[in-house]
Image (spheres, rainbow, N blue to C red):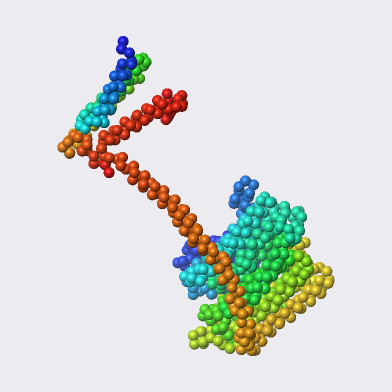
Amino acid sequence: MVPTNYYVILSAILFGLGVFAFVFKRNIITIFMSIELMLNAVNLAFVAFSQALGKLDGQVFVLFVIVVAAAEAAVGLGIIILIARNRQTLNVERVDLLKL
Amino acid sequence: MPTHPMLEYLWIVPLLPLLGSAVNGIFGAKWPNKIVNSVALGSTGLSFLAALEAVREFFESGQVLFHKEFFTWIAAGNFRAGFDLQMDQLTVVMVLVVTGVGWLIHVYATGYMAHEGGYYRFFSYLNLFMFFMLILVLAANYVLLFVGWEGVGLSSYLLIGFYFLKKSAADAGKKAFIVNRIGDFGFMLGMFLLFKTFGTLDFVQLFAKADPWPAEVMGHLGTFTIACLLLFMGACGKSAQLPLYVWLPDAMEGPTPVSALIHAATMVTAGVYVVARSHILFAHAPTAMLVVAIVGCATAFFAATIGLVQTDIKRVLAYSTVSQLGYMFLACGVGAFSAGIFHLMTHAFFKALLFLAAGSVIHAMGGEQDMSRMGGLSKKIRWTYLTMLTATLAIAGFPPFAGFFSKDSILLSAFQSEYGGRNVGYALYAFGLATALLTAFYMFRLIFLTFHGKQRYDEHHVHVHESPGNMLAPLMMLAVLSIVGGWFAAPAFLPGGTDYFTKFLQPVFGGLELAGAEAEAYSLELWLAGIAFVIALAGAVVAYWVYLKRPEKADGFAKSLKPAYTTLLNKYYVDELYAAVVVKPLLWISTNVLWKVADVAGIDGAVNGIAEGATAIGDGVRHTQSGNTRSYAVWVVVGALVVIAVILFWPSSGKPVLGMVH
């Protein structure tokens, strides 16, 4: 049986990659994907702990997260399509109308 | 049905004028004068009748003191101030004078004010004054008395400034209010001291607790002395005594009925009333008594000298009022409280009459108040002349007019005074007598300048006419009162006779009176009365000689005494002195410290500083909003890292951190 440590370390690496991509990537779709990556990294940690502690709570949480992520994906992709249409670009550096 | 309905519902007496005031004040603006009249006269007239009925029931019930608590107004800890009214013989005198004379002056005012703007406003204020004055005299504790005290001050302010478009009237109103504030400050301190010492401000309880205490020795500043002096400070403000008398002459800017009612007959006597009401406290403080007597006597003499040279008819009467109030305090100060109250009553009659008659003269002259532009009016306004002459004889102290008896009993009490030794008493008597001489002189000067001698006005411009009936009727009634008003105390002159007024007030003032019951006192009193009469006659004769017989001598007389004359004409420069010593420094402090430092730098600085600080912080922080989504993401990451770091490395492990549970 794979020790829980491994799962948690993998989860942390995936989460770190997600954060890194979120901060440094410019393409809005890549940023969106990095958010999904972070969510799933957390899901992995939940499942791992659920198995290690023998409780179902973690798995229930994971199901919730998947549902919410799906809804978020629908809304997020809609926004991305609108931005692409209006501004002819997917670069977040150029989506800065809210600055002072 | 209670046996004494009016006593049980004593609050009706003050409430009626309040209702009249409210009705006229709210609805009167659109009403014709007739309806305003009936509301004002009806409410005060009914109040007078209610007071009469209450007095009748009071005597019928045979109580020494009627006291009733209607409701608790303030209750805090062991402090209780209630809407409690009481009635004893002193209250009876005051209530009847206030409502009776007040009603007559209301009647007079309907004629005098008939052609003035703001008619309803005037009567609304006048009724409001009646309400507060009745609260003042009926109150059963110092707190409620103080409500009336401040209330009459307010009405006085409103009525002095009745012609508020005139700057001098508005200023006079403010002056009256502010000078009274000084006195009220002392009055309140006195109340605080009494409450601290005795734990109550209710008259009955307070005096019952104070009575068994031993009297303080002369010259010792004990609790009683300090409390009495503080109360007297309030009385000095309200009753225009030295050094706070300066507002009363200026208060003559108000309409003449106001001068008669508020600034002669009733409100200004409130100070005398308070001293008389607190006589048990004063009896324990001989030092305070001596101060009261000296201040009263000094004021009487001082104001009378100023009255000698004034040419404005109302100002002469104003200084005369200050002087007569001084007499009342002199009486209280030598322990003759009933003589003081007696003079208060007779003074209310003849001084109200003098003011109303002066108002009638002013009315006849079309607004002229300067006596040097009158003269020879006696034939043209016969009734005004006769009534005013009656009042003059009364105030100058000619028998058998009212003022003779009251002034005489005061002088007798001063002569017999033992506060501060016999010599002090003799000195007080001497100054009192000198004041009587001056009084007779300036009053007959007023009569001769106004009604006799050559006509000094332009007949083509001034159409002299007698006043209407509703002004003359109150004059005549007051004239009758000025004659018979003194007879209550008259039989004391006859050997074996009784001073009914003193006897009447005996339940209130008790054995405090220095009543000369011995037979030799009668002959002394007769002697003193004779001297007073001769003095009054001398004053009148001198005035006759100077102003009628040899009018050209008056100017020469004034010239030969030029420095004294100008000093008197300028009222001893007291107003100028106060302006230099009190008003100017206060203004300087207000401008340079309170305004420029405390207000501009302190208060405005704090408010504006906070606002400017907020702007500056916003200015600095706004650069964090770059509009770049990724920079926001960096902030989120940094924030998350900080939270994690705090959770992991916060030193106080084991306790919840930031609301999280380990």
| Left or right of A59 in this view: B337 | right
Residue B76 seen from this side: yes
Where is B177 relative to A11, above or below?
below
Where is A56 relative to B225, above or below?
above
Name the residue nearer the viewer: B619 or B99.
B619
Specify the quadrant of the image occupied by residue B506.
bottom right
Residue B505 in the image: x percent, y percent? 73, 64
- Residue at point 61%, 64% (across, down): B237
| Left or right of A67 in this view: B388 | right
- Residue at point 18%, 34% (across, down): A90
Residue B362 in the image: x percent, y percent? 55, 79
- Residue at point 55%, 79% (across, down): B369
| Left or right of B396 in this view: A18 | left
Specify the quadrant of the image occupied by residue B308.
bottom right
Residue farthest toward the top in the current orientation of the protein: A1
Specify the quadrant of the image occupied by residue B583.
bottom right
Residue A39 seen from this side: no
Name the residue nearer the viewer: B612 or B267.
B612
Residue B219 in the image: x percent, y percent? 74, 60
- Residue at point 68%, 84% (across, down): B542
| Left or right of B516 in this view: B629 | left
Locate the N terminus of chain B and report the quarter of the image it occupies.
Answer: bottom right
Residue B175 in the image: x percent, y percent? 55, 67
Name the residue nearer the viewer: B404 or B294.
B294
Locate the C terminus of chain B and report the quarter of the image it occupies.
Answer: top left
